Amino acid sequence: MKVSIAEVNKDNNLRHTRGGYSGLYQGDILLTNEQIHENKGDRSKRQAYHNKNYPKALWSNGISYEFRNTSDTVRRVFLKAANIWSENTCIDIREDRSAEDKVNIIDYGGCFSHLGKIGGGQILSLGNRCAHVGIALHQLGHTIGLFHTQTRHDRDNFITPHYENLIDDLNPGWYFGKGDNQFDMESPRMNHNYKITYDFGTVMDYGATAFAKFAMSMCMTAKTR
């Protein structure tokens, strides 16, 4: 990615759900009130999201979308990302303006999306600075129902978080504190990874320098094996 999601959302004054970036969970996820309640309660999230409405919350018939207020560049980028997901998975992603349940691709300035299928119209925002295939792939991952990989219950076997390198107002006391953060691990009971090992090249991780104090500071590093 030529630009990070964290940088774009910060520059657009899109704030976290707790103190900074309000309304966005983990920096780029738009949760419904029901999802916020579930997350604050039983922490019932996984690498792949299942809520109390599972399996109805799955995109069982593929993902329908409609372009709303987007540039030609954003459209081209989204279509490339959608084709990559469709060609490499069993997920059918198609344009269907008449669908009852669909994703509205819209420019709200930043890069963010709803998590999983919420029913009716839902949002995937790609501002012009988000017009990169990697970013569109990442946001579509959230739409499918994926959280960030670094929240896996077994992540400490693979990466080391470096809280000391976070920018000053993002400290473990709240941004990475229990229940509201990038590096908060899930329990094995709540985190279903389907026996798939940690993928260091996944589009569902933020970059190692996202939210860092300085350009070259690492907020997480891979462990040697």
Image: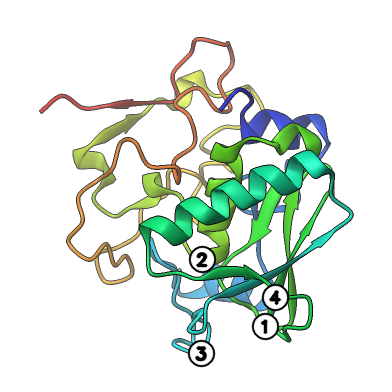
Q: Is residue 137 left or right of residue 18?
A: left
Mark before the other along the chain sequence, 3 or 1: 3
Whole-number angstrom distance, CA of label 2 to CA of label 3: 13 Å
Position of 215 relative to 179 (above/below): above
The residue singled out by tag 3 in the image is 56
Most extreme residue toward the left, as rendered? Answer: 225
Mark before the other along the chain sequence, 2 or 3: 3
Image coordinates of residue 216 in percent, x first then y, are 50, 10
Q: Tell which tag, 4 or 2, sits nearer the viewer.
A: 4
Q: Tell which tag, 1 or 4, sits nearer the viewer.
A: 4
Type of the residue with mark 2: Ile
Picture residue at 69% right of the left edge, 82% below the top = 101
Whole-number angstrom distance, CA of label 3 to CA of label 4: 14 Å
Q: Are marks 4 and 2 in contact (CB under 8 Å)?
A: no
Choose between 112 and 126: the one closer to the eye: 126
Picture residue at 58% right of the left edge, 47% below the top = 80
Q: Tell which tag, 3 or 4, sits nearer the viewer.
A: 4
Dot 3 falls on a residue whose secondary structure is: loop
The residue singled out by tag 2 in the image is 144
Image coordinates of residue 140 in percent, x first then y, are 56, 56
Q: Are marks 2 and 3 in contact (CB under 8 Å)?
A: no
Whole-number angstrom distance, CA of label 3 to CA of label 1: 9 Å
Tell me if mark 3 has few (under 14), some (14-19) or many (20+) residues whose alpha carbon lies within 10 angstroms of its own.
few
On the image, which quarter does residue 170 sit in?
top right
The residue singled out by tag 4 in the image is 102
Q: Quadrant of the N terminus?
A: top right
Mark before the other along the chain sequence, 1 or 2: 1
Picture residue at 54% right of the left edge, 38% below the top = 134
Dot 2 falls on a residue whose secondary structure is: helix
